[in-house]
Amino acid sequence: MKVIRYASLLLALALLATVTLNSAPQRPANNEKRIDALLARMTLAEKLGQLQQLDGEGNGTFRPEHPDLIRKGLLGSTLNVRGAKNTNQLQHVAMDESRLKIPVLFGFDVIHGYRTIFPIPLAEASSWDPASAERSTSIAAQEARDSGVRWTFAPMLDIARDPRWGRITEGAGEDPFLGAAFARARVRGFQGTDYSAPDKILACAKHWVAYGATEGGRDYNTTDMSENTLREIYFPPFKAAVDAGVGSVMSAFNDLNGVPASANPFTLTKVLRGEWKFDGFVVSDYTSVKELINHGLAADDQDAARLALNAGVDMEMVSRLFNQHGSQLLKEGKISQATIDEAVRRILRIKFRLGLFEHPYTDEAREKGSLLTASNRATARAIADRSMVLLKNERETLPLSKALHSIAVIGPLADDHRSPLGWWSGDGKPEDTVTPLTGIRAKVSPATKVSYAKGCDTQGDSTEGFAEAVALARDSDVAIVFVGESAEMVGEAASKSSLDLTGRQLDLVKAVHATGKPTIVVLINGRPLTVGWIVENTPAVLEAWMGGTEAGNAIADVLFGDVNPSGKLPVTWPRTVGQVPLYYNHMNTGRPPEANNRYTSKYLDVPWTPLFPFGYGLSYTQFKITNLQLSAKSVLPLRGNDTLAVTVDVENTGKRTGDEVVQLYIRDVTASMTRPVKELKGFKRVTLQPGEKIRLEFALKAEHLGFWNREMRFTVEPGKFKVMVGANSEDLIEATFEVQNGS
Ligand code: BGC
């Protein structure tokens, strides 16, 4: 794809021969010449300066030493410095006072919004609607760009099968296929087709790689896995991002099979550059170069710089070892001039593609009018609407009538402004957040009495507020209880050994439920929680996740039926933390679990099944999926674009318009290696009117049927395959086909 794009750009270049050098930042051949010219003029210190990224001071400001470093050519990039004024001020030093006038690249964690905050990525993935992710990242790019940010450390593409790991909140969940679809969409949203466009920014695929597999769910921990698992489960979202043209990649903190990811030549050079032809640059994660010493890979600072540079890290975030030791390493022959030049080249290439040399500054007047606009908020609300997952709805408890006489809104998160913003909330401000209480008040009829009691905090032992909450519930027609996690309980360095509700939150739900009033539970959280009691005992449970700036309005949209919930879980929900890791696409065992056979793969004290399976979510209407047909029962080995068509009927058998996410899974029944019991290979989100029935078609290709074999070659093996289609990973109808031998 990239080749085609470059070819057409070159053609355009030929036609526009009169245009000045400065107006076409993406012309690759020309960029390489400009890089050659710069490299020829750069001193070693200036080269090492381009490899350095330093953190700002807080609140978007730069540190006092930054201008001088930039003036001397010793600092190429910053993180967290933002705001048009701050970035312009620093950029002026680079453009007006430094010898070579190489612009600074301003990076920031724009993870799920810049000022308008969208649902956390895990929530957005629950929409199973990559187009929503493309819209949110594209708005985030525009807002960030207008504030001087040119580079985001996103999308986060780590597959996560362990909800104890707090960073599960930042990604698209447990599945490589869904993860790849969201990776593509997010890269497109941030970068567009040309990230020099005035409303686009550079994206960064992180954390390369397998950081989500951190042992025990403990952040920064060791990962150890086969190359097959790496290639089939952890690589696909990154490959999708590279194919979508992502310009940068971040090397992770974790040790991977004995070689930390920030010094791993296999992942950084062999796979990324060699196999995938990635031509952007790699930035280390925060001080991960220096941390090679703690890992026990590097003897000292100099050694850490040597290992990271030689493995393929180009830019060092925060620690300064490339700068401090680059020259000595070069003198001693421990790194080559070519390695340094190549790292500089990759960084300059992206600076040119960004159009930074031509447009280094940000329009300060524009910034004011472009953040948190009504239209950006409306999009955030629409995406939050699509991200919520209805987990239980007995006897149509939901949706509620807007004309109820009285509603008790209860819980520590019912009127909390911070939790909906989640972890990495950019420049989002709690005071801009619509809380559930505000959303509900705005939704119901003026005659409805909405009263509020916090009941308890998310942490701590106090039950002092219970009496008030219980009294309110008693006096109301219904109680809606908002429990879950506060923002600091999720994200980086937020691993947990328990997935239960913290503090006295469960007791609060029990106390309210004991009043006998219909008790609806809304969960605000960033990871799966073990909420078995609630699911068993209360009539309706809505997973609202951390829904961003417009969370409260979106929650009210769903609770009162203006929006029919349509989200599906992108991650398995365990019954107890002891089941973790629990994921749908596991291998079979020699003794698959059986109810009446002790000697099968299961626990004595808990069912082997999850609380909610991957792909699960209800609607206010009902859907029926029937009539699974394949275009052939036996096919020659599929090649390239050869397809096997899979069709099903989907019907809305209920009384409301609604969206269903129809999911397709395959299983390679017998192969030369054990294969997962199910693998997602297709999904489609469709809107159906009551009574409407449509026929959906999926196309299976070789890429969906193959796997990495014992020789580490991707191959489709002949034999029997199952195709399964349904509304979640457990509720499926199936058919089989055969891939024939031979060519
Ligand atoms: C995180 C990255 C983040 C970086 C910069 C690190 O601690 O792991 O995800 O991009 O900090 O803020």
Image (spheres, grey):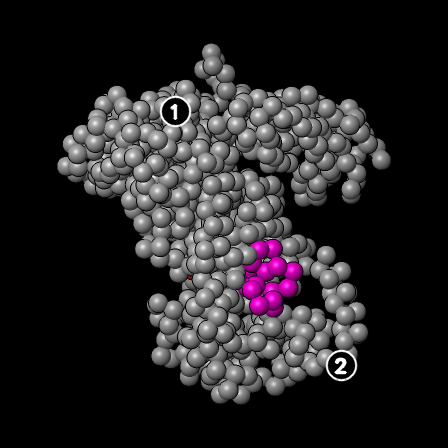
698 is higher (above) or lower (below) than 273:
above
Q: Which residue is mark 1?
A: 397
Residue at far top of view:
596
Residue 440 x, y percent position in the rendering = 34, 39
User: Quarter-wise, where is residue 310 in the image?
Assistant: bottom right
Rendered location of residue 502, percent (x, y): 28, 38
Q: Residue 371 in the image: state x and y as whole percent.
A: 45, 62
Q: Which residues are magenta?
A: 188-209
Crowd tier of the residue under label 2, counting other residues whose Cα lies within 10 Å: few below 14, some 14–19, many 20 or above: few
Disc 2 secondary structure class: loop
Q: Is residue 689 above or below residue 159?
A: above
Q: Residue visible at 32% across and 50% down?
A: 418
Vertical arrangement, residue 227 with respect to residue 2, above or below: above
Count residues near mark 1 (Cα–Cα under 10 Å), then give few for <14, some for 14-19, many for 20+. Answer: some
Q: Nearer the viewer, residue 501 or 740?
A: 501
- Whether residue 132 is visible here, answered yes or no, is yes
Q: Disc 2 marks which amino acid?
A: Thr
Ligand 1 placement by image quarter:
bottom left
**Residue 613 rendering spot, x and y as whole percentages:** 49, 29
Q: Residue at x 58, y 45 (%)?
A: 130
Per the image, is 473 magenta?
A: no
Q: Secondary structure at mark 1?
A: loop
Mark 1 Cβ and ligand 1 under 8 Å apart = no
Camera sees residue 491: no
Front residue of 620/628: it is 620
Name which quarter of the figure residue 671 lies in. top right
Position above or below: 522 against 355 = above
Q: Residue at x 61, y 68 (%)?
A: 196
- Residue that lies at the very extreme toward the right in this rendered image: 743
Tell me the residue that label 2 is attached to: 18
Distance in Å between CA atoms under marks 1 and 2: 68 Å
